[in-house]
Amino acid sequence: MTRATRAVIDLAALQHNLDIARRAAPYSLVMAIIKANAYGHGMVQIARALHDADGFGVATLDEALQLREAGIQKPITLLEGFSHSDQLVKLRLHRFDIVLHNEAQVTLLEQSPGVPVHVWFKIDSGMHRLGFNPQQAKSVYQRLLTCNAVKKPVALFTHFANADDRHDSYTKTQINTFLTSIDAMAISPAPLTSMANSAAVLAWPDAHSAWVRPGIMLYGVSPFTDSTAADHDLQPVMTLHSELIAVNQHHKGDRIGYSGTYECPTDMPVGVVAIGYGDGYPRHAKNGTPVLVNGQRVPLIGRVSMDMIMVDLRNQATARIGDPVVLWGEGLPVEEIARHADTIGYELLCGVTVRVPYEYRHH
Ligand SMILES: *Cc1c(COP(=O)(O)O)cnc(C)c1O
């Protein structure tokens, strides 16, 4: 048998989570965000399983091309648009939609007559990453209206900086900034818009509009800093499994692992699990990070190494080699592991490495 370490992807949970997004924003179309290999879940498999989504959003042209090569016919939006004219040729050929966020892109479009491209005109309502500021927006929008390379009507787009904090009124401010700058553009009939990431799908109904763009919630992870998936009836899609490959009895005072960061307070059994940062388990996970052994929580002890971690088995006296271990997923929210490693669930999911085999399940 090969190494037991594997990521099991629950496609029924994925579909359930899409339903939750639809129920939260019943009047919106859903652009399922599957960038970064679908947050580490396998982009093509996830796109196929999300056949009920209305479209997909990815970051790069290469991601979009992979989807078309796999036969995915739905609308695909490039969230970063394009930066070179050869990319423009390809995105036209494959009918990708783009987020248009700077003047260089407008100029390239004006210089490249051809099949009109569907654009999401991006306004920077306060994230201060990509997009036109509200003062520039009107004049650039006028340029788009006279550009034959741009399909009409032009849809509008923005992205939130702090929606993960339900109590932060900055999201409300961004919604107002976005809607006010659209009003100032006096577009008739009113344009299609898209604002909401997962956090706004769940907490900011004012942001729902024509299209919502859930990402993390589809994978069964809470987008909020102060909750876990179950609080929103979301089900984890990825469960990261491994097994015990050793159970050793150590003595009081023995120090465990690299740099000896954990010292046994008593004589105690210590389990070794076949997972490490070489698989994407975070090296910054602290002593005490929960790990499920035989379905029960035990604490991580000592440094995470490349291929292994150690766990305190004092409450698992009968644990033995081959016993099942879960690092995150079903029964152990990735949000919790992320908090112990000073990061967010997004990063852990994206970080599972190619060494880990994936198994897709439909129920
Ligand atoms: C990644 C991304 C999303 C999805 O965000 P989640 O927090 O994962 O829901 C939505 N819109 C844009 C522009 C993004 O880059």
Image (cartoon, rainbow, N blue to C red):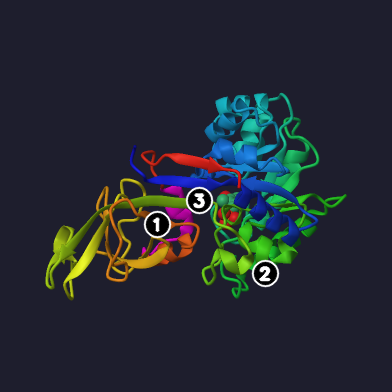
- Of the residues tagged 1 and 2, which is closer to the observer? 1
The residue sitting at 53% across, 72% down in the picture is 226
Q: Position of residue 116 (x, y in %)?
A: 74, 30
Farthest right residue in view: 189
Label 1 CB sits under 8 Å from any ligand 1 atom: no
Residue 165 or 330: which is nearer the viewer? 330
Q: Position of residue 354 (x, y in %)?
A: 39, 38
Disc 1 residue type?
Leu
The local secondary structure at tag 2 comes to helix
Identify the image quadrant of the N terminus: top left
Q: Earlier in the sequence, mark 3 or mark 1?
A: 3
Bin the neighbour count of mark 1 within 10 Å (Cα to Cα): few under 14, some 14-19, many 20 and up.
many
Residues marked 1 and 2 touching at CB (< 8 Å): no
Asked if 229 appears above or below 92 in the picture, the reply is below
Q: Is residue 242 left or right of residue 128?
A: left
Residue 252 or 213: which is nearer the viewer? 252
Q: Is residue 345 magenta?
A: yes
Residue to which mark 1 is pinned? 327
Q: Is residue 125 magenta?
A: no
Marks 1 and 2, how far apart in space? Answer: 37 Å
Which residues are the magenta region? 341-351
Disc 2 residue type?
Lys
Q: Is residue 118 left or right of residue 11?
A: right
The residue sitting at 44% across, 66% down in the picture is 336
Residue to which mark 3 is pinned? 238
Q: Earlier in the sequence, mark 1 or mark 2?
A: 2
Disc 3 residue type?
Met
The residue sitting at 72% across, 30% down in the picture is 149
The local secondary structure at tag 3 comes to strand
Asked if 340 appears above or below 119 in the picture, the reply is below
